[in-house]
Amino acid sequence: MSCEEPVELDIEGTETKLVLNSHFTPDQNFEAYISKSLFPNSKEFEEYLDDVEVQLYKGNEVLETLMPVDRFPLPAYPRFSYQSKNSQPEVGVEYTIRAKAPNLERVSATSSVPMPSLIKSFSMTNVKKEYPPGKHSVIDSTIIDYLFDLSIEIEATDDLPTYYHIDVYYEWVPYDIIQSDTVRTYTGDFIPIVLDDPDGEFNGLKHYDKGILVKHESSDDLVLNFKTRTPNSIQSEQDIFDKLYVDLRTVSKDYFLYHTNLTRQIEYDGGVLTEPVLLYNNVNNGFGIFAGYSLSRDSVRVHTQ
C-alpha cells in the first residue's frame, strides 16, 4: 500500500498529537504509518516514529501487535511502517487500531471493509491516433497519441450511498522483434489515464493523485463515460499500447470523506474568496485516517487498427 501525500494539518493549539494513516483491504496485511503532528505553517518534515505500541483489534479481541518495519533499502518515504504478520482484513468486519507513543496521548480509530461492487462492463471505443510534431515541427508517424472513449458500468448495490475510487491505467510494455515474433516485456510500470469530468450527471470529483472519487446514491447501475487520451506519447517502434486496466475500489465513507477533503485541500489556491478546507479525520485524540476498501479489477485489450 502506498503512503499518503504529506499535508499540513490545521491544528488548533500547540499540543503535539499522533498522526495515523492506514488503508486496508482483503488479501493484504494491515500497514500503518505513524508520525507526530506539525504546527500550522511549519516548514519541518514529518517525523515518522518507530517506537509506538500499535495494537489491532477485532471487536474486543486483540488480533496482534503491529511491529515497526524498516522499509530501507526501498526508495520510499516514510522509512518506517507498522505491519501485521498474521492478520488480513475481511469484508464486513469492524477493526480498531490503537497506538501509544511515549509522552503522547493514545489514539484509536475504527473502520471496516465494504462489500465489493461488480464491474459489469469496461469498454474502449472510437480509438483514434494523433501524431504530435517532433523536432523542427516534423510529423513523426512512430510517435503516437491515442484518443478514445471509455465506458465503465458498475452494478448497483443495496447499500446506499455507495462510495467509489475509480482508476484507469495502462502498462508500459516495450517489445523486441525476434525471429519475426513480437516479444513483449511487461514492466509493472503503470501510467494512469486522466479521467476528466465524465459525460452526464456526476456526483464526485477528480482525485488529486489519480482516478476519480464518486458517491452513488441511486438504485440503478452506475455508468460512466469518458473522452480521454494517453497522457504520454507512445513510441511505437519501441513500445506497445497493449491493454487498459480499471481498478474499482468500493470504499468506506471515512475513506471517501478523507480523500475528498485531501483533494480539495491540495487544490486550495489560498484565495480570499475561497474557503479553506479542513482535512477529515477519524482518529480519536489524534489525526489521520484508518479506512477499509474492497477492490475489483477488469481489463480490455487495445485495438488500434
Image: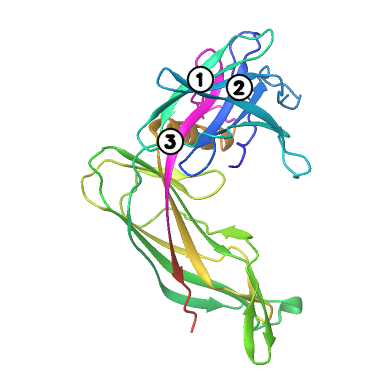
Q: Which residue is mark 1?
A: 283
Q: Amino acid at mark 3?
A: Phe
Between 154 and 106, which is closer to the camera in this rendering?
106
Where residue 46 appears, as percent x and y from the top left, is: 71, 26
Q: Which residues are magenta?
A: 270-297
SS assignment at label 3: helix
Residue 286 part of the magenta-drawn span: yes
> How far separated are the C-alphas under marks 3 and 1?
15 Å
Outermost residue to the front: 86
Q: Determine whether label 2 and label 1 are within 8 Å by CB.
A: yes
Q: What residue sits 71% from the left and 82% below the top?
A: 138
Q: Is residue 222 left or right of residue 198?
A: left
Tag 2: Cα neighbours inside 10 Å, few (<14), some, or many (≥20)? many
> How far separated are the C-alphas under marks 2 and 3?
18 Å
Label for residue 132? none
Label for residue 256? 3
Q: Which residue is mark 2?
A: 19
